[in-house]
Image: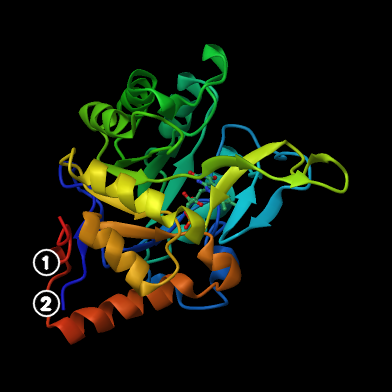
Amino acid sequence: MELSVQLAPKHKPGLLLANPVMTAAGTFGYGTEYSHLFDIQKLGAIVCKGTTLEPRQGNPQPRLAETAGGLLNSIGLQNIGVKALIKEKAPIWAKWPVPVIVNIAGETIDDYAQLAGKLDGVAGIRAIEVNISCPNVKAGGAEFGAEPDSAARVVAAVKAATSLPVLVKLTPNTSAITKVAVAVAEAGADAISLINTLKGMAIDTTRRRPLLGSTTGGLSGPAIKPVALYMVYEVAGAVEAPVIGCGGIATTSDAIAFIMAGASAVQVGTASFTHPRAPLDVLEGIEQFMKKEGINNLTELIGAAR
Ligand SMILES: Cc1cc2nc3c(=O)[nH]c(=O)nc-3n(C[C@H](O)[C@H](O)[C@H](O)COP(=O)(O)O)c2cc1C
């Protein structure tokens, strides 16, 4: 049975995954936190926590709120910063067979370019995933990924600064997701992952205040799956670059639905909080499904519902 997927077909040496199941940024730490719970080396790839130039403390508490079928978070990109990541985490990853992809975030285009430059050539780092759901501080705080032009400028700057494969992670908080996808593909994205969280909020009615310390947060989990599936379907029909589906994937059938919609790979996020082994269960379920259906190559399933 052939489960491998090439996520950067136009890149040399590319980004070949042994299978299509990845973890989603910010929900699987640096991988090390989960390695005692199951054999994480069996996964297709691990995407680490969003990383910034400087260490960040994140947003004020509370930063998590459960919702019907979902989770609101306002972590605010708490992370150790790129310097510590290169010094402390990359040497561990360099010994792992599973490829590790570093998710990056910035407040200016130059932040992204600097991050990409620092990660280039570091042993243990196999690709970059660019989180464009961040506020563009110089342009008044709108998300970089909300508009095709600003999204493409980030991607072009990252591509110019690194020889690593570049995945671009789209935000659903836009009225133009397909246009943004086409623009980032033209700017050189090797693959496109989607979706990030949907903007939302909760109110603590006892205190008569917003529940989250930073007022708004990002919605994830099963509640967003139909939205994510629709966006993956649209984007996969508009770009040639491989698409990676993410958003509410908790079971094998969720993952297969995204693959049938056109995703070459999937990311499991919030599901890992309630069930840390979820990514491996999803992978094993895909193998069983292919066996049962007599499918020899995963590529037969990609876009099968289109
Ligand atoms: C607590 C938390 C932290 C996250 N941090 C990041 C991050 O640092 N960078 C990023 O691109 N996405 C981040 N995300 C978004 C997830 O990677 C994913 O796109 C989103 O949660 C939808 O998938 P899910 O429903 O499977 O969780 C975060 C999500 C959660 C719940």
Specify the quadrant that holds the N terminus.
bottom left
- Which corner quadrant of the image does residue 215 belong to? top right
Q: Residue 266: x, y in percent? A: 34, 59
Rendered view: 86 above or below 284: above
Q: Which mark is residue 103?
A: none
Q: Is residue 43 above or below residue 196?
A: below
Q: Position of residue 11 (x, y in %)?
A: 19, 42
Residue 300 got which mark? Answer: 1
Residue type for callout 2: Asn
The reply to whether the C-beta atoms of the residues labelled 1 and 2 are less than 8 Å apart is yes
For residue 281, what is the image quadrant?
Answer: bottom left
Q: How is the image coloured?
A: rainbow
Instruction: Find residue 292 and report its horizontal and vertical position in percent.
Output: 19, 86
Drawn side of residue 292 relative to residue 55, left or right: left
Q: Quick one: SS at disc 1?
A: helix
Is residue 89 placed above or below 176 in the rendered structure? Answer: below
Which residue lies under the disc numbered 2?
A: 296
**Would the CB of label 2 be found within 8 Å of ligand 1?**
no
Q: Residue lying at the far bottom in this picture: please name it.
A: 292
Q: Which amino acid type is shown beneath numbered disc 1?
A: Glu
Q: Residues within 10 Å of mark 1 (few under 14, many from 20)?
A: few
Residue 272 at what x, y percent from top left?
Answer: 53, 67
Nearest the eye: 137 or 146: 146
- The residues tagged by marks 1 and 2 sit, at their Cα atoms, a distance apart of 8 Å
Q: Residue furthest right?
A: 207
Q: How many marks?
A: 2
Q: Which residue occupies 34% across, 18% down?
A: 149
Q: Quadrant of the C terminus?
A: bottom left
